[in-house]
Image: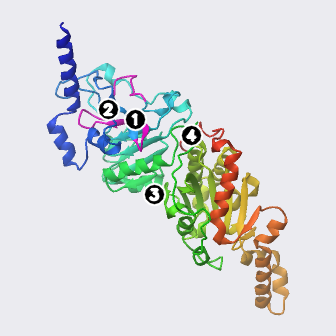
Amino acid sequence: MEKQERIDELKQLMERNRQMGGPERITAQHALGRLTARERIVKLFDPGTFKETWLLLQALTPDREGTITHINKVSGSGKIDGRTVIVNADDATARTAGYRPANQPPRGTYSRLYPEMNHPVIHLADGGDARTFLNSADRLPDPIPTRAFTGLRRVPHVTAVMGDVYGAAALEVTTADFVVQVKGTSFAISDPRLLDRPLAPETSLEELGGWKVHSEVTGQVDAIAENEEQALQIIREFLSYLPENCDKETPLIPNSDPRDRILDKLMTIIPDKANRVYDMHQVIKQIVDDGRFFPVKGNFGKTLITCLARMNGRPVGFIANQTLINAGAAGPDECDKAADFIILCDTFNIPLVFLADTPGFLVGRPAEQKRIPTKIIAWMQAIAFSTVPKMCIIIRKAYGMGISNMCGTNCGPDYIAALTTAEISFMSPEAAANVVYLRRIESAPDPKAERAQLIRQMERESSPFPAAHAGLLDDVLDPRDTRKYIIDCLETLRSHKGDFIGEHRLQGWPTGF
C-alpha cells in the first residue's frame, strides 16, 4: 500500500470518528437540551488546548444499525487556567454511553488505576448502561476494576452528571472526589426500563435519581448546576482550589483583601444571646478573602457547612455549625458530610478551620436508627487521621461532646481559640442550672429568682476566660480580629509543616460510610 493511501485512510478514520454518532443523533442530543461530548470539552478547556487521544479506538461489536463505531468516549487532555487536566467525556451519540471494550477503560477514567498520574481527571457522564447484547462476549459483566478500589487518591477526580446515567456508569460517578449534577438529569443503579413496573408503577427519573434526591437525601452530589455551562464553570472553580496532585501545594491566587481587615460586622451578626440563631454563612463571608467561598454538599446535612475559600490567597477548608437549622446540632448526615470533606482536604493539602457553635448532637429515634454513634466516631477518626493543619475557633456555643467533633482540645487542633462571645460548658447554662442545682432551686424561698441567679452564675462560669486560664484555649479573641488571627496562625503553621503537604493517611478511605 502506498504511503499516501495509508495517510488518506488515517484521515478518513479520524474524520469519521470525529463525527461521533452522525448528524441525526447529534440533532437528537441537542433536542434534549444537551451538548455533545466535543461541545462540552470546548467549553471546559482553555481555548485551543485540548489534545485528543484514543481517537481510533473502536467498539468490539456493531451498533443496532450493524455499524462498527468509535468507542463512546472522547478522551484527552487540555488546560484549565493554564494547568493540565485529563478528560473523559461520554459520547451519548455514538452508542449507549456506558459501553466500552472489555478490559479497556480509557486511561484516567478511574484515577486510582494509574498511580503515576499527576493531573486532575474529569469525567463528563452522559448515558446509561443498558444495551442490546449481540454475542456471548458482550454478555460478560463490565465492572469497575478492583484496582480502582484499592488504589490511593492521588489526583482530584471530578464527575459531572450531564445526562441520565445508570448501572456501572452510575457506580463510576460515586468514585469521584467531587460530583456536580445538572438539573433535569438522573443517575441510579438501575435503568428505569429494568424496574419491575408492578413494584414501582409511578417511579419517575427525578424520583429515582434526580438532583433533589442526590443533593438533599443521599449526599452523593456535591453541587447542582442549572445547566451544562454552569456545571463546567463549577468544575473549573472547584479545581482552582486544589493542587494538581497530592504531592503539590495548593495554588496561590493573590488578592487585595487586607490580611488584617477588621471584621466590624461580626459584632452585629453574632447575637448577644446564645438562644438566638444567625446565619454562619455570613460569618464565613466576613472572614474569607473578598467574601467568596465555594460550598460543598450545600443542600445535604444542612446543620453543618462545608466549603472551600481562600485566606490571604491560599485555599482553606471550613467546617462550621449552622444554627439556623436545629440550633446547629449535627445529625447522621452531617457526620458523613464532615468525614467526606476532611478526607478531601487532607488528601489535597488544604488546611481545615472549624467554626464552632454547637449545642451537641441531634438525638432521638431517627438519629439512632441511622447509627449516629458510629457516624460520630467516623467523623472523629477522620480528624484523628488527618495531618493537614487544623484550627478551631469557638464562635459561641461549645457544649458537651459536640465540640470534640469540631476539633476541640481533645482532637489535636494546632490552634484553638474562642471569641469573647463564646460559651463553653457541658450543656447550656439554663439546663446546667437545673441539673447541678435542682435541689437548691426547689428549696429556695423564691425558686424562680434563685434559678435566674444561678443561670447568670453558670453563664459567667461558661465564659471563655476560665478555659483560657486552665490552658484549654490558646487565645481569646475580639471577634473583629478573627481574620487576622487565622491568617497569622496558618502562616506560622505553613513555615514548619512543609507547605501543608501532609502524610495523606486518608487517601485509602472509602467513598461512603
Q: Name the residue under label 2.
A: 73
Helix, strand, or loop for circle 4? loop
Q: Residues within 10 Å of mark 4 (few under 14, many from 20)?
A: few
Amino acid type assigned to the residue bearing label 1 in the image: Ala
Q: Position of residue 272 (x, y in %)?
A: 65, 80
Cβ atoms at labels 1 and 3 below 8 Å apart: no
Q: Does the magenta portion include 329?
A: no
Relative to 322, is 98 above or below?
Answer: above
Relative side of 414 to 281, left or right: right
Amino acid type assigned to the residue bearing label 4 in the image: Pro
Relative side of 74 to 79, left or right: left
Magenta-drawn segment: 80-107
Upstream in sequence: badge 1 or badge 3: 1
Q: Give the spatial CA distance, label 2 vs label 1.
A: 15 Å
Q: Give the spatial CA distance, label 3 vs label 4.
A: 21 Å
Residue nearest the observer in this picture, 79 or 59: 79
Q: Which mark's residue is nearer the viewer, 2 or 3? A: 2
Relative side of 61 to 490, left or right: left
Q: Which mark is residue 43?
A: none
Q: Name the residue under label 4.
A: 510
Upstream in sequence: badge 1 or badge 4: 1
Q: Mark 1 points at which residue?
A: 168
Upstream in sequence: badge 2 or badge 1: 2
